[in-house]
Image (spheres, coloured by chain):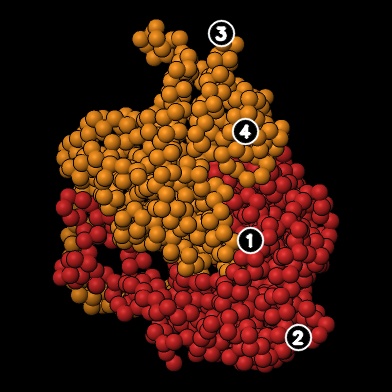
Amino acid sequence: MDSSTSVALEPLLSFLTFSFSKLESGFYRIPGSAVVARYVKSSHQNDPGRTILELILVIFAIRTLLQSRTRTDRSGKHFIKFSEKEIDELVDEWVPEPLVQPLSEWEQKDLSSVPIIAGPNGPKPKLLATGKIVTNLASFNFAGLAGNEKVKERALETLQKYGLGSCGPPGFYGTIDVHLDLERDIAEFLGTEASILYSQGFSTISSVIPAFCKRGDIIVADRSVNFAIQKGILISRSTVRWFDHNDLKSLEDTLISVEKERKKRKGPLTRRFIITEGIFERDGEMVDLPKLVELKLKYKYRLIMDESISFGTMGRTGRGLTELYNVPASQIDMLVGSVANGLCSAGGFCAGSAIVVDHQRINGTSFVFSASMPALLATSGSEAITFLRNNPSVLLNLQDNIRAIRAVLEKTEGITLLGHRASPIIHFCLRTQQQSFSVTQPTYDYEAEERILQDIVDDSIANRRAANAGETFTWTRDEKAAGVVKASVTRILSKRR
Amino acid sequence: MTLNPPSPSPSIFKEKESLSQLLSITTAVSYLSAIQRAEFRARTRDNPHASPTPALSLSSSITISSEDTVLNEDDENNYLTNPHTPPTSEQVFTTLHAEFGHCANEAYRCVSKHDYTKPFQEHTIEEPPYYIHLATYISFLILHMLGHLRDFFGKRFIKSHFTHLMPHNGYAPLNSDFDSFFPRRLKRRMDDCYGQPITGVPGRTVLILDRYSPDYNHTQIYTGGKTRALNISSYNYLAFSQGRGSWADAVVESIRRYGVSSCGTRLESGSNDLHVSAEALIAHFLGTEDALVCSMGFATNSTFIPGLAGKGSLIISDELNHTSMRVGIRQSGAEIRIFKHNDMSSLESLLREVISQGQPKTHRAWKKILVIVEGLYSMEGTLVNLPRIVELKQKYKFYLYIDEAHSIGSLGSRGRGVTDYFNVPPDSIDVLMGTFSKGFGAAGGYIAGSKPLIDALRLRSHSVPQPTKSTLSPSLDSSIIVPNESAEELSGMAPASMLPTWINLCPSLADGSEARVRMRRLAFNCRYLHAGLKKLGFIVYGHASSPIVPLLIFNPGKLPVFVRMMRARPIPIVVVVVTYPATSFETGRVRLCPSASHTKEDIDIVLRACDEVGGILDMKHGSCERWGIDEVCERAVELAHSV
């Protein structure tokens, strides 16, 4: 029995010895293998336990390398194993929430109170619901470009030649010569090297910020920047430090503390950005641009400034804050503005150096992945710039109107006017009793306050004036309109008390 | 064979003074086109609503502006502007051949519809031979090595070129050289293939502005010349983006009446009656309760998705979803899981896992699950497996969001997208999103669904309530309305009461026959091109009836060469090539988008060009049975109906 097995195993054994010797000679032929062999031998002699330990280490390393690097929930420690039947039961039991919560009564009212205009928008539009002609203090028509015949004429010509849609993203035959013209016009108007055109205002800044600010970069932003900027900051994943609203002292403190932190950590130099608005959409405050530029240069930050409101409204010819303060636009690294507001067309732009602009042509998500704007809107924008260049008196008129309306509203009881006195958007808020008495932070009932404001708005509309919750915009000189707003405020507030 | 970007030579299709040409009408074709123009002018004048002065300037502006599009009398053989066969007296074409090809042959029509007798065509990926993959990897390796070498030496010896990549003067570099490596070192080599400016209507043909680069694509210099090329790249699927025609007249009228901008957001005095009727029309067109419009397609996704899901919800997204959706999903704050592209079994196993496991760590049940897919994928040409996904939806109770950016207006027998194609009732899908910039030839986007959903989105989405930021669909809605209507007419049941009274549509648009013809021409062109390329031996991705036909090239080096060779042909053709990061590393491709404006002869020309260029570039690695190019062209109808 024994001998027969040994006979049967003989060829196998001889093969094993042969292959082992072959392997050994092959191993020693590798340069440097002798050193490894000596090391293994000596370590095994000194401490056989160590060999086992090292073997385990090698196996562990191989396992780690082979493991997939993606998130594996199935093997995670929180993963519970279920049988197919249990999963079916769980699936049957699961009841999802409705996709959206139905609107509350208040929201319903809010939605139905949105004014719908019949026909063109302008200083005196007609409301669809009542058919009344109202004075419009709610639209972004600062330079009175809505319904401008020249713009219309140019748009019509463009339509005949270019059709309507551009039918492609800028990279893929969606760049039309009129887009290049408008980009050049904007850059020349502002005095920057170049500019880039986005097809929607909201998406402009929320695309510009993540194009430059990446993970690990530092953003120092104003506490009450508008929603689009907040979204852009959110998506950038950078480290954000906030400074007090429109308080450049607070900004400087923040910049100093960031620098201190960096020195303490001895971290590498990262990109640093200051993000703020020219005229704040939320309350109409205006930033002190020369001081801001001074700080930016002193602490070596790059400045992203949203001029959505101030472009087309401020300065002698509407070039925005840079013209108003006589600061060269090239001092602002990324100057973002709106073609929709200031030029009464659509879209937005970012102006800056050629490097800044070119970088966005491949990294600005909403530029790269969206169809470019229709040709007729681009030519309307160009025409509007020509209009602003040739008619500086329009903006003087705008300032007159702002002064007139503010003068009336300032005298109104129960409300406080916010914002800079030259701002083309005028916000007012309700003056509350608590504010004057308590030193502690007053507790606001936002919803109640909104309701009062909405009532004021509704009341104004009933009196043939369209306005907006808590904010008023102006183009036409109409002190009577301001008077009506004043009367509405007084009436509603007296009802509430 | 010139593989370099074209040098500044005068264009072969010279532009001449059109006014003088109009006086010397020589050929029958030019006579016909002159009659058409006269007719058009007469129609504009007859329009009782148009004011007299602008009408005059309008007709004059046509003569001037049509300089680019008018027939060129000198070029008798100019295929692109003159029809191949002159039309007979019975055929009346109201479009310019250069914008919308004249094609009277009824055989070249198809109906875009899913055949339920056949199983759903799964997304199969045909693999090329191994050496192609190997060559692709090696090309990328060489490109990377060269790029890094140039960076290494450049940073040391030509510092002035690298200031924005290096810390200077206390500022960190504006963009890290790693982030910008791809555009600087890889894309720049083929920059002449991207961002090519055009002028005029992006219809059947397009005028590209000639340019050349003296310094390896760092700067582009425009020569001032223009070249007319066959356009197989624009998303103008139904060719509604035209400078003339009944819909263009309606847009003209709407600009006259409403101006260009709506001057405000929808909630703040920016809404007008046109928005309201556009929304009603879209809802009616899609068969949903309500709809809303947004001024930009990208923003429709990126700002409305956060209004649908938030913390405690889960969003399941296809791995190849468009960036706009990814931005929206990231902003929403919901958990995100990804499933394999269009793989329904992967989706099902993922659903089973997430529903049984609940939220991570806490194991609480999800508030809701939103599955986000595209109807037609813009880079792959694949169609979503809608029947299966609707089945899964019933079983797993998730909400379904379909982005129909490319499929709306281009798929389905009535142009209503994937629901129409698969004949699935639209109310079985919770959220239907789409754009107007493609099939409808306008701009903007929409979301359609149930009334409570749309109302909630109107108030709660990101872009709508934000002051200053999102002037919604300025005046363009008017233009949206028009193509919509015409598409609406596809079903032949547009209630006239839904349209503004001042819109006068010509009879063929009003009864939907025009749109129906366009749909059927588009369906034929797509199927013919797709099947033809396969028969020629190319590897083509996507669904047989998709208007996006991706033709695989693989090697990065061949991409720019393909574009340049197509552009340098006797009849120039403009094509789009895409590679990393829009697709995966090894699957660089050409994306062809046939439209309703192409004639059968145009598709023949594209096929012939691909055949020749593809032969030179060694692109034919398909495993399908092969035909010669002549056979493909002859048996076109058979090919189109075989799929």
Labelled pair 4, 3 in contact (Cβ < 8 Å): no
Q: What residue would you read off at disc 4?
A: A134
Instruction: Indicate which disc residue A497 carries.
Output: 3
Callout 2 amino acid: Pro
Q: Is residue A19 left or right of residue A262?
A: right
Instruction: Indicate which disc residue B54 carries.
Output: 1
| Chain represented in orange | A
Output the chain of dot 2. B
Q: What residue would you read off at disc 2?
A: B87
Instruction: Indicate which disc residue B617 carries.
Output: none
**Residue A33's x, y, as percent?**
21, 71
Q: At x 47% / y 68%, what residue is drawn?
A: A177
Callout 3 amino acid: Arg
Q: Quadrant of the C terminus of chain A?
A: top right
Q: Quadrant of residue A82?
A: top right
Image height of A464 relative to A233, above or below = above
Q: Secondary structure at mark 2?
A: loop
Callout 4 amino acid: Val
Output the chain of dot 1. B
Q: Is residue B344 left or right of residue B325?
A: right
Residue B451 seen anywhere in this rendered image of the structure = yes
- Nearest-to-viewer mark from 4 and 1: 1
Residue B332 seen anywhere in this rendered image of the structure = no
- Nearest-to-viewer mark from 2 and 4: 4
Q: CA distance from mark 2 to mark 1?
A: 33 Å
Q: CA distance from mark 2 to mark 4?
A: 55 Å
Q: CA distance from mark 4 to mark 1?
A: 28 Å
